[in-house]
Image (spheres, grey):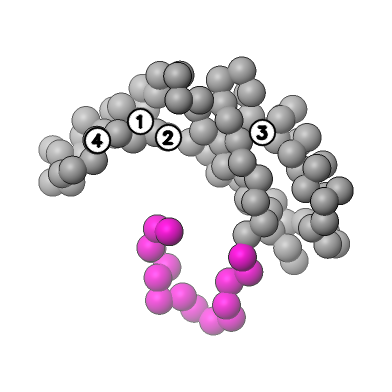
């Protein structure tokens, strides 16, 4: 089944206290060299049928009216690549 991902992030001009708290904690935990952290939300939507322009438009409308507060958040919508069959060697990897 096709999957569409909606990523929601605070707009750059909006303060991100949770991201700032993570950024301050990283050096204490031995993770150096990170100069900024922004925290966001990710929604993965499994879609019935093809993911065509009409389906993506409907998902953008959903994101704008329900998944994101567009006064303070931006969002992106993308079709996720289908994973290859079988277990992944990079199960904990970040892309």
Q: Secondary structure at mark 1?
A: helix
Identify the mark at residue 67; answer none if there is no mark: 3
- For marks 3 and 2, the one nearer the N-term is 2
What is the CA distance from the residue labelled 2 to the residue labelled 4? 14 Å
In contact (CB < 8 Å): disc 3 and disc 2: no
Q: Which residue is mark 1?
A: 19
Could you tell me how far apart the alpha carbons at marks 3 and 2 are, in whole angstroms? 15 Å
Q: Quadrant of residue 74?
A: top right
Question: Dot 3: what SS?
Answer: helix
Is 91 magenta? The answer is: yes
Is residue 39 one of those drawn in magenta?
no
Residue 56 appears at what percent x and percent y? 78, 48
Q: Which residue is mark 2?
A: 39
Of the two numbered discs 4 and 1 in the rendering, the one whose residue sits closer to the viewer: 4
Question: x, y percentage for residue 19?
Answer: 35, 30
Numbered circle sitting on residue 35: 4
Q: Dot 4: few (<14), some (14–19), or many (≥20) neighbours within 10 Å?
A: few
Residue stretch rendered in magenta on the structure: 81-95
Q: Earlier in the sequence, mark 3 or mark 4?
A: 4
- Residues at marks 3 and 4 touching, judged by CB atoms closer than 8 Å: no
Q: Which residue shows up at 36% across the image and 22% down it? A: 17
């Amino acid at each position: 089944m096709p999957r569409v991902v909606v990523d929601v992030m605070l707009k750059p001009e909006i303060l991100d206290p949770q991201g700032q708290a993570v950024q301050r904690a990283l050096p204490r935990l031995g993770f150096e060299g990170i100069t900024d952290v922004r925290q966001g939300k990710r929604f993965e939507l499994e879609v019935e049928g093809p993911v065509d322009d009409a389906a993506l438009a409907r998902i953008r409308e959903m994101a704008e009216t329900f998944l994101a507060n567009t006064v303070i958040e931006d969002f992106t919508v993308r079709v996720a690549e289908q994973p290859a069959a079988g277990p992944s060697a990079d199960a904990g990897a970040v892309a």
